[in-house]
């Protein structure tokens, strides 16, 4: 099975502005090496969020390979050629506990998106989706009938805001286009263990599948990544 992880960061939200000047945040999240990469970049704030997204993506994958680790951002160490941070499409190697994961990154003026996969890539494909929320999208959150018709009770247990609902909705629409199976037959389940959220997984008609899924949302943007068998 091919496991996937992804993360998106909205570069236009107030919370992401000028974060490269926040010394306390920088010291808490980034290693001295990573701080050097950020401070030497001509696009320092964007570089910061690229590294952040890479760390988040790696954490999601490592959480699927073993029990989810305690997430200390500095423990997930990024390795990058300084010149690469000026490009719009490149890769970062993230190391954790003696293991490496390569994370692919895409940067635009609006967002940065990170994605990665690990496992048996010979028998699986991957696909991703990115969507910007619209005002009409957010109305669905208050429509109880819509929610109940698109998500099972088990799914709704892990949905806590409009973004988490809509990223699941559009991901299942994407699944429907890929497979020809109606979105209502898919479930994206995110269980908890000892009150801690676990990685999401996909079921079809209530049964586990050999598909994998990763969800992300931030600000106005939704993103998902899927792996599916080559049949």
Image: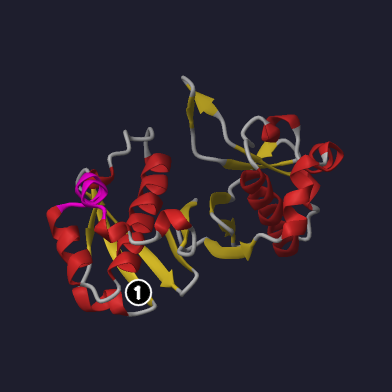
Q: Nearer the viewer, residue 160 or 57?
A: 160
Residue 144 location, quadrant: top right
Specify whether 114 is left or right of 184.
Answer: left
Q: Which residues are magenta?
A: 22-31
Instruction: Report x, y in % for residue 142.
Output: 78, 41
Q: Residue at x 43, y 42 (%)?
A: 64
**Within 10 angstroms of label 1, few (less than 14), some, or many (20 or more) residues?**
some
- The structure's colour scheme is secondary structure
Please tell me whether residue 195 is drawn above or below residue 179 in the rendered image: above
Question: Is 130 one of the magenta-colored residues?
Answer: no
Q: Residue at x 39, y 61 (%)?
A: 17
Please tell me whether residue 76 is drawn above or below residue 87 in the rendered image: above
Q: Residue at x 18, y 59 (%)?
A: 35
Please tell me whether residue 11 is drawn above or below residue 213 in the rendered image: below
Specify whether 70 is left or right of 36.
Answer: right
Instruction: Report x, y in % for residue 133.
Output: 66, 59
Q: Nearer the viewer, residue 132 or 83?
A: 132
Residue 155 location, quadrant: top right
Q: Nearer the viewer, residue 56 or 228?
A: 56
Q: Residue at x 57, y 65 (%)?
A: 127
* Name of the residue lying farthest toward the top: 194
Specify whether 48 is left or right of 223.
Answer: left
| Residue 119 appears in view | no
Residue ID for mark 1: 90
Instruction: Report x, y in % for residue 201.
Output: 58, 41
SS type, badge 1:
strand
Instruction: Report x, y in % for residue 214.
Output: 53, 50
| Residue 25 appears in view | yes
Tally the numbered discs: 1
């Amino acid at each position: 099975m091919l496991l996937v992880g992804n993360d998106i960061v909205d570069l236009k939200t107030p919370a992401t502005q000028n974060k490269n000047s926040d010394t306390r945040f920088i010291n808490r999240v980034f290693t001295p090496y990573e701080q050097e990469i950020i401070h030497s970049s001509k696009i320092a704030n964007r570089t910061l969020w690229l590294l952040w997204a890479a760390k988040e993506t790696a954490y999601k994958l490592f959480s699927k390979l073993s029990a989810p680790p305690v997430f200390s951002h500095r423990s997930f160490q990024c390795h990058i050629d300084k010149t690469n941070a000026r490009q719009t499409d490149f890769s970062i190697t993230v190391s954790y506990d003696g293991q490496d994961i390569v994370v692919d990154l895409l940067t635009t003026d609006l967002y940065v998106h990170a994605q990665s996969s690990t496992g048996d890539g010979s028998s699986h494909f991957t696909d991703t989706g990115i969507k910007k929320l619209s005002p009409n999208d957010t109305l669905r959150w208050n429509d109880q009938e819509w929610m109940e018709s698109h998500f099972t009770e088990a799914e709704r247990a892990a949905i806590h805001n409009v973004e988490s609902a809509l990223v699941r909705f559009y991901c299942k629409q994407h699944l429907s286009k890929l497979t020809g199976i109606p979105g209502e037959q898919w479930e994206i389940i995110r269980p908890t263990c000892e009150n801690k959220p676990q990685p999401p997984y996909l079921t079809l008609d209530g049964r586990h599948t050999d598909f994998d899924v990763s969800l992300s949302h931030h600000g106005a943007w939704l993103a998902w990544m899927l792996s599916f068998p080559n049949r």
